Image (cartoon, grey):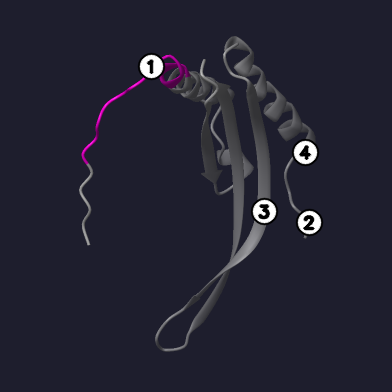
Amino acid sequence: MNYKYDKNLWETRVREISAFFKKYPFIDDSGVSFRFSKASAFMVNSEGSEVKSPVDIAIITISATSTTPDGMRLSDNIEVIAPSPADIPSDEWFEKEIALLANRLKNIKTAETFAGTTAVRYYF
């Protein structure tokens, strides 16, 4: 298949998005990946009619890990799925989302240890 997207543009964007993690020294590891795929969607109705439609999909996955003082590994991620590379949000949007992701990890990392009982109810 011949995919139509600007490889150089997306290599640059992935690096730029990844660079936002430099603001968060408590993040041990992070990654940004971009995938673009072409596929076909098939729909068949009860009368036997079939429709085959081309489907493009662009995906950016962002992940980050951190470690608590007692050694517990924490991770979080963001995944954006769009119908084409042109529909992926702006770098500014990713900067804000990465800030939120980093804040979630920091809050969990610095949370007080809980020692106590929990009530669990099972439904069968």
Q: Residue at x 67, y 39 (%)?
A: 34
Q: Residue furthest front?
A: 116
Image quarter for residue 18? top right
The secondary structure type at the circle numbered 1 is loop
The residue segment tinted magenta is: 106-119
Residue 98 % position (x, y): 52, 23
101 and 2: which one is in front?
101
110 and 79: which one is in front?
110
Q: Amino acid at mark 3?
A: Ser
The secondary structure type at the circle numbered 3 is strand
Residue 20 % position (x, y): 61, 17
Label whose residue precedes the other's in the sequence (2 or 1): 2
Q: Is residue 89 magenta?
A: no
Above or below residue 19? Residue 10 is below
Report how far apart the C-alphas of labels 3 and 1 lie in the structure.
40 Å
The crowd level at tag 2 (other Cα within 10 Å; few <14, some 14-19, many 20+) is few
Q: Residue at x 57, y 26 (%)?
A: 65
The secondary structure type at the circle numbered 4 is helix
Q: Nearer the viewer, mark 1 or mark 4?
A: 1
Report how far apart the C-alphas of labels 3 and 2 lie in the structure.
10 Å
